[in-house]
Structures are given as structure tokens and as C-alpha cells.
Image (cartoon, rainbow, N blue to C red):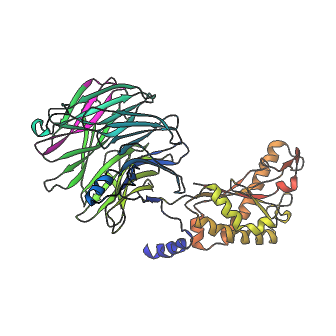
Amino acid sequence: MKHFLLPFLLFISLFAQQKEFSIIIHKPFDAALLDITQNYDRTISAIGFSNQNIQTTHHSKTYSDPFEYLASVSGQYGMQMHLVQVDDQANIVLSKVAKLSRFNKAVALVKTPDDGYFVGGYTLDGELIVVKLDAKANVVFTKIFGTKNYDRMNKLVLLSDGGVLAVGSSFTTRDTSDNMFETGLGVSDIFLTRFSKNGHMQWSKKFGTKDDDKGIDAVEAADGSFVVISTTSYNQHTDATLMRVTENGNKLWLKQYKSENLLTPKRILKLRDNNFLVSLVEYNALQQEHIRLIKFDLYKNVLLDKKIFTTYPSGLNDIKEFSDGTIMGVGYVKDAFNTDALAMLLDSNLAMLRQEHYGEDNYDLFTSLVILNNSEIAAAGIHTDNDSQETNMWIMKLNRDTTITKVQLNSKSLYDKLCELFAQEIHNKQIKITQDLDIELLDSSLFFQVGVYKLTDKQKQFIKSFGKKLIPFLIKHQESVAQLQINGHTSSEWAKEEYTSRYLKNEKLSMQRAYSVFSTLFRTQDTTTQKWLSKIIVGSGFSSSKKEVFNYIENKRLSRRVSFKIITQ
């Protein structure tokens, strides 16, 4: 098998030079992307943070004490929310940074029904933030809320009414004037806040146990209630806790999953069967992570509890479900010296089907994923260059089998390249290429005579010359090409036959014309190319359904033709 594949791969490598869909956005100091979504125009948006400079009014002051100067600039650089948008060609089409007076961090991004966004995050001094943006990332409103203590947001959940649920944690309320060494550092509670689509706060409540609880994620159930996952920490131990609350924030039940080892939930997913799946990281006695998945119903009954052991310690930071019930997860895998991003495909029974690792010899991970309309996956995360200590924002597209996709060329890009390739034929008015990638023959010597489907010597010569340019072009751009159609056409004439017989005979004739061109083009290729071409080439006959008509009069000569069409992925 290897002997067969090697020349084929070498042949393809001569033409297929498309880059992999991996976008690394370098910024000064640390930066990261923490959540990702797909827009209605099929572009991808991701949110996270980059470090920015806050301008101050002290630049003209002269300092004699270096420590005084360092103190003056220590608060000028810090995190700000950063939204990026990329298209199918891996171009950054939008990069927008928040300009809040306080440093802050975005952790969640959800798409609104009107093509805008809700962004969730927090300021670094402990307040929570919900921002609504329009489709162009202009601010519609900003809500800053929380308690008088130190709060954190972990997730923002889009609700069926267009509003959002903010999930996070808040430290135990106490008088801020108390000496913390007398009152203790306190423990935290799960903090949930519900907003309407217009930004009205409907309720804000705390939940938890007597121990240290932190809200991690939540989903909206079919009945409008919420299922929340959180951590509960006590005596240097951490467990996972499940909780269900009503749409008005009243607790229905709370269940704590106790384990001999540390157990940290990462994400909860509502499945298509209206049950729920939680991704957790469980630590063994050596403090090495492995993946644990728990499936349960609305009444906290465990349906499936699966541990997935891999060669190296690993965890899934996010999980999503395909329409057939298979699960895609992204996260990290690490050894003693390196952390890589992890993509993993699971079947509906949570058995691992495939996994792939991505990154370099440093620190890389995926934080979140979205399943795209074409069943590809877009993952957001963190990439660290070799020999660097600073993290960068990272977006990667993956195929469903966890392999990385190639950057797709759009139709306009292919159109421009085709026009450049066939510039001489276009100039000589032999062919015409349209922006939807139709290739029409214009030279009268390339048309067929009445009732004829066999190619003339001149037609054969043109088809061979045409194919020598077209086929390598298609191979070069094969990641963007789904199909090459060769379509035969006829005029509407056929002696004095009635319509049914005339149409069917013309249908057969149009297919024969397509086959003549098809076979000539195919036979001129070598075996390797033929095997690839057989996957995309299609011949068909249109009879007289697309005859050439000008001013309501059929041009029968121009109708007796063959045309080509390239269908993109």
C-alpha cells in the first residue's frame, strides 16, 4: 500500500499548495481566545483577551526614583476583551478591542437571533460584564453587575427567549471594611444572573453548599429550567456538583458527585434526546488528568458514566454533538515537557473513535469549539510559539474526522484564477467564463452539427488542449472543488417528431455529446489523474432545456454545444 500511495502523494503535492486553516494572532504580551461561534454569513467569530495600554496623563512627569516610575506604569497594561472575525479564506475581517476604563477579560460569546452577539466577562477587580453587540460588533448596551465582593464569570448561556444566563461565582458577602485576617478569606458560591434580550436583569441569585462552590456552566432544559454544573471544594479536595433551578431561579435539586480524586467539570451539553452530558477532568493518585463523561437525565439519574484513558494526561474543555449523536470534544493533552491541543471524536455511547494532537513544542490548547453548518469544526484556543513565553490567540478548522482542514478558495477567487489561466482563449473568443464558474464554448467550430455527437478533429484538439490546463488547475485547488460537470445540450429541433419523442431523443443526443467530451478528456490523463478525476467528474445531458435564445428566437446552431461547470465545496 505504501508503494502505491507514495507516487500519488508526490503528484498531488506538486499541485496542492493550499495552507492549513490555522490562524495564529500575535499580540504584545499574553493573549488568548476562550469562546467561538459561527455567524449567519458563515464567517467565524471568537472572543478572548489581549493586553492593551491604558493612556495616562503622567507621561510628562520626570522621575528621579526608578521605583516610583515603575509604580506609575504598573497599571497601564492589562487585559481587554478582544473579538476577532475570520472568513473561509482565513482572513481576519474584524479585530475589535474593548476600551473599558478597567482591565477585563471576556470568557463567553453567544450568537443572537438578530445576527449580533452577547459577550460575557468580568473586570479584574471583580465585577461581571454582559455586553450586547450588533452584527458589526458595535455596542448595543453594556451591563456591569455583581456583588460588593470578588465575582467571576465562567459562561454565558443563550436562552430560548433571546436573553442570557450568566454563570459564575461570588465570594461570601461580608463587610468590606473587615480585616480579612480576622474574617478569613471566605468561600464562594454559585452566582447566576438572568437577563432579557433587552438587557433587563430579571433575577440574580446565589447557590451552593457550606463549602467553596464555583459555577462553571449551564444549559436550558426543554421545560425552561436550568441545569448547572459547578465545583465544590473542601479539605484540599474538589468534587463536581449538579444543580437544577427553575426559570425563575428557584432550586429544585442539587447533587454532588464525590470521588476519591479531584473531579473538575468543564462543560455541560444538552443532547438531542433532551438528556445531558458533562465533560469532567478527573485526577488520579499521581495527579494526572484523564477524561470522564457523565450522561444523566433531568431528574439527576445517571445514564452513562465513562472514563476515557489516553497515553498522556488529557482533558476536554468543550464538547458538542453532531446531528447523528456523535460527540466532538476539544481540550489538551500533555506530558512532562509539552502541552498540545486535543481534538477527539466519540460515538453516541462515548467510545473514542479518533483523536488528534496539534501544536508545537510548547504550550498549546483548545478552549472551545463550534460545529459549523458543513459539519466542520472551528476551535479556539491558545498557541505558544517555540522559544516563547507569551501565548497567542488561535483559531483552527478541523474536519469531522479531527484532521485539519485546508483553506478554501471562494468562487470569486477561482473565477479570477480561471480567467487568468484561460486569458488567451477568452481573448480569442473561444470560451466564456462566468463568475458562478460556468465555462461556455463560443467558437463556432466547437459546436455540433444537427444530430451529431462524435467530435471532429478540431473539437478533439481543443478539448485536449483545454484539459491540459483545466485538470491540473482542479487538482491544485481540489480542496475547493466538489465536482466538474460536463453538460451536453441540443437545439429543440428533431424533424417532425411530437414533443415527447423529440425531447427524449434530444436527451439521448445531449448525453452522447457530453460522453464524447467526457471520454476524450478522461483518456488524455494518466492513470493517477484518472483515479482522482473519477471522484469529481460528472457527465449529463440537458436535451433542449437550456437552448440558446435571443430576442425570443432560438439560435439552433449555438444550442448544439457542450458546457462545463465547476461546483465548489
Q: At 39% across and 47% down in the image, what residue appears?
A: 80
Say which of 248 and 123 sits in front: 123
**Quarter of the image that includes the N terminus:** bottom left
Q: Quadrant of residue 238?
A: top left
Decide if residue 105 is on the left or right side of residue 423: left
Which of the two residues, 322 or 41, is positioned nearer the viewer here? Answer: 41
Tally of numbered tags:
0
* Magenta highlight range: 223-251
Residue 102 quadrant: top left
Q: Is residue 290 left or right of residue 385?
A: left
* Residue 308 image offset from top left, x and y in percent: 25, 52
Q: Residue at x 86, y 46 (%)?
A: 497
Residue 200 coordinates in the image, percent (x, y):
41, 26
Instruction: Say whether residue 205 is magenta.
Output: no
Question: Who is closer to the viewer here, 371 or 486?
Answer: 371
Q: Quadrant of the C terminus?
A: bottom right
Q: Main secondary structure of the magenta part?
A: strand
Q: Note whether 501 is above or below 561 in the view shown.
A: above
The answer to whether residue 163 is left or right of residue 510 is: left
**Residue 132 percent location from the top left of the image:** 45, 36
Q: Is residue 343 left or right of residue 334?
A: right
**Residue 303, image quadrant:** top left
Residue 489, percent from left and from top: 78, 54
Q: Residue at x 79, y 58 (%)?
A: 561
Residue visible at 83% across and 42% down in the picture: 499
Q: Residue 556: tell me if it is visible.
A: yes
